[in-house]
Image (cartoon, grey):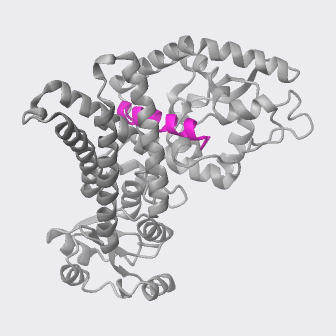
Amino acid sequence: MLRIFKKYYPIRNALFVFGEGIFIFLAVIIACRVLLGGDTLLFQIDVVLKALLITITCQACLYYNDLYDLKVTDTLTELGIRLLQALGAAAILLAIVYFIFPNFIISEGIFIISIAIIIVLIVSWRIGYTHVLRLGLFNQKIIILGSSNTAIEITNEIREKKDSGYEIASIISKSEWSEQTCSLDVGIICQSSYDNICEIADQLKVKKIVVALKEKRGAFPINELLRCRVNGIEILEGNTFYEMLSGKLIVDQINPSWLIFSEGFQKNIIQRLLKRTTDLLISFTMLIALIPVIILTAILIKLDSKGPVFFSQERVGEKRKPYMVHKFRSMRSDAEKKTGPVWAKANDDRATKVGQFIRKTRIDEIPQLWNVLKGEMSFVGPRPEREHFVRELEETIPYYSERFSVKPGLTGWAQVSYGYGATVEDAIEKLNYDLFYIKNMSVLMDIMIVARTVKTVIFGMGR
């Protein structure tokens, strides 16, 4: 397993992405060889650079068209449609690059042949990879000990995510849930007794046991697990494993001691300085670059409806310090006159015509760059909330106040991972992601979130 931003990814997934990049690169080299001939093409620096440019552009477009999300591309038809869309977008981007940097231009014939070869290689590669996943090759077998909600969530996550890299070999639990699960999947061995856990692990060639018991007092098989640990089997606490598997926590399942003793939450002065420097560079650059968009948006808002161009509202920031957040006004000026504070929602009927567009494209968020520049917000962090809802959510959701240990963000791990939310249940799910971010935040993770935010903006998902 590869550990990236405290989340684990199967090595085969990395090899899948890397292998696809190699195929795209080789497709260009082969096309050059076919049209230009020569035995030293691979060693000519200009050919290599041009092939790398095409490879990086194509893989970026594959990513932004969800071609690395196997839930989306689970049929050959969907794969074909998205592949053609991605390669079409790559062609447009490369045309722009070639216009700006003519020295990178590759001949039309080579490009066409490369695309044809790329399609054949990618489809073949993905069919082969899907077959590997279907057979469960290279999956790491685990034993789940217990039947808590965490155990259920882990089981569902592994079942729904084809490329999780894990396979449940056995469930050891005294519950109806485990019996039902085993009856649905004959490949899982179930046992209600905590005896002979090590023998079962050895028999099934399991090297990882996940402990997710409902109640540990009086039921924790200390001697058995200690014997397994001494024999080289990794023992993982359920919440720790779920965090690594899914990239989020389960706030209603974790206890304070787990948060206290688990890794993460480091916020040293170097990390804070790097984050603040990154915030200043991004916010200042974007404010300057987006001046035309800001002016045009302001004009359209004034023409579309009565009221001010900007909308300012008090939010709760780091260490519960209140501040005024600024946005382009996307709703009627009297939106909450009759209802009082209510959550915004997707397709909100209070939004104006221009407001609907700027909300969908996230243009309404641009003025918050000023909040970032002032240091009231960070570019990446939990989304800020109003005091009215904060009080309500703190009474309902455990650990909700931990969001205020960092600056709120213009975008965040919850926004790119979950999408729009307008209920308490959505707030709980978003907190699961927010706590994961607060626990594991780093500048590199921020960069990844920004990249995923671009994808979210382009395709109009999340909030």
- The answer to whether 24 appears left or right of 239 in the picture is left
Q: Is residue 265 visible?
A: no
Q: In the image shown, does 119 or 395 lie closer to the viewer?
A: 119
Residue in the image at 52% along x and 37% along y: 412
Q: Could you say which quadrant of the image residue 334 lies in?
A: top right
Main SS type for the magenta part? Answer: helix
Residue in the image at 80% along x and 35% along y: 351
- Percent of width and height locating residue 371: 60, 19
Q: Is residue 346 visible?
A: yes
- The answer to whether 28 appears left or right of 213 in the picture is left
- The answer to whether 268 appears left or right of 285 in the picture is left
Q: In the image shown, does 214 or 72 lie closer to the viewer?
A: 72
Q: Could you say which quadrant of the image residue 212 lies in?
A: bottom left
Residue 271, placed above or below residue 14: above
Q: Quadrant of the N terminus?
A: bottom left
Q: In the image shown, does 135 or 107 lie closer to the viewer?
A: 107
Residue in the image at 75% along x and 42% along y: 343
- The answer to whether 160 appears left or right of 264 in the picture is right
**Is 392 in the magenta?**
no
- Percent of width and height locating residue 421: 66, 48
In this view, the residue farthest toward the right is 338
Q: Quadrant of the C terminus?
A: top right
- Percent of width and height locating residue 394: 65, 46
What span is in magenta? 442-463
Residue in the image at 36% along x and 69% along y: 211
- Percent of width and height locating residue 348: 78, 42
**Is 449 in the magenta?**
yes
